[in-house]
Image (cartoon, helix red, strand yellow):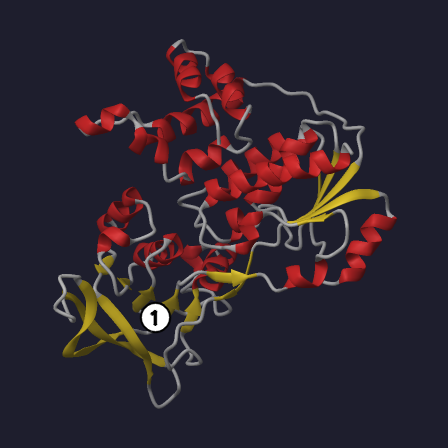
Amino acid sequence: MGVDIPSFIRLLREGKTAEALKKIREQNPLPAICGRLCPAPCEKACILTKEDAPIGVRALERYAADAGRERLTARPHVCKGKKIAIIGSGPTGLTAAAELAKQDFQVTIFEAMEEPGGLLRYGIPEFRLPADVLNGEIHSLQNLGIEIKTNALFSKRENVKRLFQEGFAAILLTLGGGRPVFPDMPGLNLGGVYFAQEFLMRARHFKAERIMRDPYATNIGNRIVVIGSNHAALDCARIAARLGREATVVFPHIEDEMKAVQLELREAKAEGVKIDPLTKPLAIVGNDKSLARGVKCQHMDFADPHSNGQWQLIPVVESEFTIEADTVIVALGQQRNEMIEELVGSEGVFVPEQSASTEGNVVNAIAAGKKIAFQISEYLKK
């Protein structure tokens, strides 16, 4: 994202936390969020990595954001430029709004849910991103002059036309992911089967500690199997483990190929989550009441099936087994939001590249927000 890492670290060493935060925000409008969720690729590039002691850039960014905000004062700004509407208040939408507001554009964010944040609020557990941290970041953005309207659902092309009629010069669609990716296996329609974003939203809405006590919440039982190896898979498993349930994560490849951050993987294991790599799910098995009772799996292993020296993962013959489960959570990502196809096509309507793929992390979403904000700015300056 272009953050001047040496400069903000130097300011921290001098005790200038507010100045360090300002330096970070020159390129990153959501430092408290990145300081918690970033996979920290800059740490891997640190020259001290060779000595197994890279500088903890993510932790320093988190500290600067948390401590610096208390000392950083900002007067609410009133923007006077052209009006821009942003549909969706996830990380891409918030970032684009911040970049455009800095250029004095009047930015209004329309969010379908009752609170802003999108994925950040409804798709990430509070133990990874506390609500007060997210609220603080959003408040900082509002001080830039950004207006946020919640409970504003946009689902038809007429909504876009109406925004143009109301004087908006450009519209940015940051609608996030659409339908979940469905695995090719039987049993998805059984009771007790959830998709990751659905489960995470329920947990965030009902508060995880109430899940088992609230009759309207999600009754997850005692044994939870999560299918997948991404951030969402680990988040779901960690929620289950924190409720005292047996949580197992299964996927057909090796552990080193997991999309989740290694730190989060270590934390999940420390919390009691069982990781089962080289385990291919074949079917979700149900009981006579059409409720999930387990996941039928098959072991995977490396072999040279063609005797050409090219090793690859293949199923182990006669290695099928069943993991008992009261709840099965499918965490294989999301597809492109189909609603985007309904709304795009008009001049002045923009869609960030991140919307084409939902596999990216929060940092990629922020980068996409910066990029699309530049494109909108250039369009409006013509």
Q: Residue at x 70, y 63 (%)?
A: 342
Which residue occupies the foreground of this view, 354 or 17? 354
Is residue 80 depicted above or below 323 in this figure?
A: above
- Residue projecting furthest to the top: 14
| Farthest-out residue, front | 308
Query: Viewed as shown, does residue 374 lie left or right of 204?
Result: right
Which residue is at 46% across, 22% downward?
67
51 lies above or below 18: below
Q: Is residue 24 left or right of residue 55?
A: right
Which x, y percent locates residue 19? Answer: 51, 15
Foreground pick, 107 / 327 = 107
Residue with the mark numbered 1: 221
Residue 249 lies in quadrant: bottom left
Q: Residue at x 52, y 23 (%)?
A: 69
Residue at disc 1, secondary structure: loop
Q: Residue 89: where, in percent of width, then height?
A: 62, 46
Which residue is rendered at x = 38% and y = 81% of the image? 187
Question: Tag 1: residue type?
Answer: Gly
